[in-house]
Image (spheres, rainbow, N blue to C red):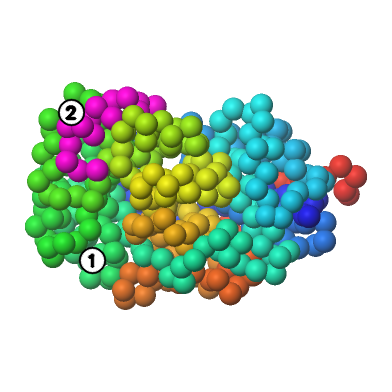
Amino acid sequence: MLRIDRITLREIRLRLREPFRISSGVVDERRILLLELRDASGVTEWSECVAGELPNYSPETVDTAWLAIREWLAPRILGKGIGVPPEGVHDILDRHVSGHYMAKAALEMGCWGIAARLRQTSLAKLLGGERERVATGISIGIQRDPDELAQRAVAAHAEGYRKIKVKIQPGADVEFVRAVRQALPKGTDVSADANSAYVFADAPHLALLDEFGLTMIEQPLHRDDLVRHAALQRQLKTPICLDESITDMQRTEDMVALGSGRIVNIKPGRVGGLGMSRRIHDFCAKNGIPVWCGGMLESGVGRAYNVALASLPNFLLPGDLSPSARYWERDIVEPAWTMDAAGMVTVPRDALGIGVQVDRARVDELTVRREDLRAPGQA
C-alpha cells in the first residue's frame, strides 16, 4: 500500500537544441511541468506532465494541467491508501472529471514510479515489460525544402535510428517524402505524420503517398473524426496510424470496429497514464493491431516512463524514444538517455523506480514556479 503525503509541482523552462516544427506550430523552448511525489514512508519519485504551452496538439496546456492537479485531482489521492501496483488510480482520477488526461497521467504515472520503488523493483518490471532494449525511431520536423529534409533523414539513418518519421502538411508532403525515400536505402522504415493537417477531401492527394511504401501515415485527419478516417483508410494502401484520436479504451475499440486505422501510437500522457496504456496495449495485441510509443518532447523524466512502457511485448514498431542529446544540450536526469549504434535504447530493468536520477540542482536552476500540495494534516 502506498500513501502519497506530498506532491511538489514545478514548472521548468528547457530550451531545445533547435526549433521543432509540426503542422500546428513550432516549439523552441519547452515549458515542462514536473511532479515530485513523496510517499508517507519517505520514498520519492518524479513524473512529468506532457502538456504543451498552447492547446494545439490537445486542449490541455501546462497551465490548465497545473490548475486541474491542484484543484481537482491531487486531493483525490493525497493521504489516501493506494494499492500496489496502482491499477486503480486512473479510475479514481477519472470519476466525474472529464478530460484532463495529461494532468491525470502525471499523477497516475508518478504513483507507478513510487510503487516500483516500494516494491524494490524497476518500473519496467512492475508493468510487465519483457524487453531488455527497445528500438528507437526519430521524428523530424517540417523543413524548408525536400533536400534539407532528405539530408536530415540520411544523417538520422546513419546514426542508427530504426524508423524515420517525417512531419508533413499541405504543401510539404509528397515531394518531401519522395526525397526522403529516394535518399535512404531500400527497405528503410519511413513514416509520415500529419498531426491532423488534412481533411477528407484531400484523400486523392494523400493516396499519392502510397507509392512510397510507408510504414504508416499518422493522424491525417481531425482527432475526433474516426468515421472519415475509416473512409480514408479504405482508399489508401498505406496503413493509417491513429495518435491524437486515441484517448481511451472506447476510442480504441471504435477504431477497430470502424476500421479507422491499422496501427496505434500509445502516448501514456495522452490516454491518462500507464494503466490505460497497458489496457490499450493488451486490447490491440488481441486484435492484431501493432502499437508503438510516441513522444511529446519530454525531458528525461518523461522518457523514462515511455521506455518502460515500450518494453511491453506488443510494442512492435520503433518508438519516438530519441536520446537526450537529440533535443537537449543538457537533460535533467542522470544518466542521460542514450542510443547505441543499432538504434536501441537500454531498458533500466535492474534499477529501482524509473531508472534514472533527477539532477535536483539542475531542476532548481531551471524552475520558474513551484507549489507544494500536502495531504490533510501535513505541515
**Can residue 273 be seen by looking at this rendering?**
yes
Q: Mark 1 sits on what residue?
A: 157
Residue at horizontal 17 percent and vertical 32 percent from the top: 235
Compared to 340, does 333 lie above or below? Answer: above
Residue 181: in magenta span: no
Residue 325 versus residue 302 in the image, above or below:
below
- What secondary structure is marked by label 1? helix
Which residue corresponds to the image point at 58% horizontal and 74% vertical from the top-left?
Answer: 350
Which is more toward the observer, 376 or 332?
A: 376
Question: Dividing the picture into quarters, in which one does residue 218 lie?
Answer: top left
Badge 1 local density, few (<14 within 10 Å), some, or many (20+)? Answer: many
C-alpha distance separating marks 2 and 1: 30 Å
**Relative to 97, does residue 90 appear above or below in the rendering?**
below
- Give the percent coordinates (x, y) of residue 13: 53, 52
Residue at screen point 39% across, 27% down: 224
Q: Is residue 119 left or right of residue 186?
A: right
Q: Give, as a single range, the part of the protein colored magenta.
A: 224-239
Q: Position of residue 109 (x, y in %)?
A: 61, 51
* Kind of residue at disc 2: Asp
Identify residue for label 2: 202
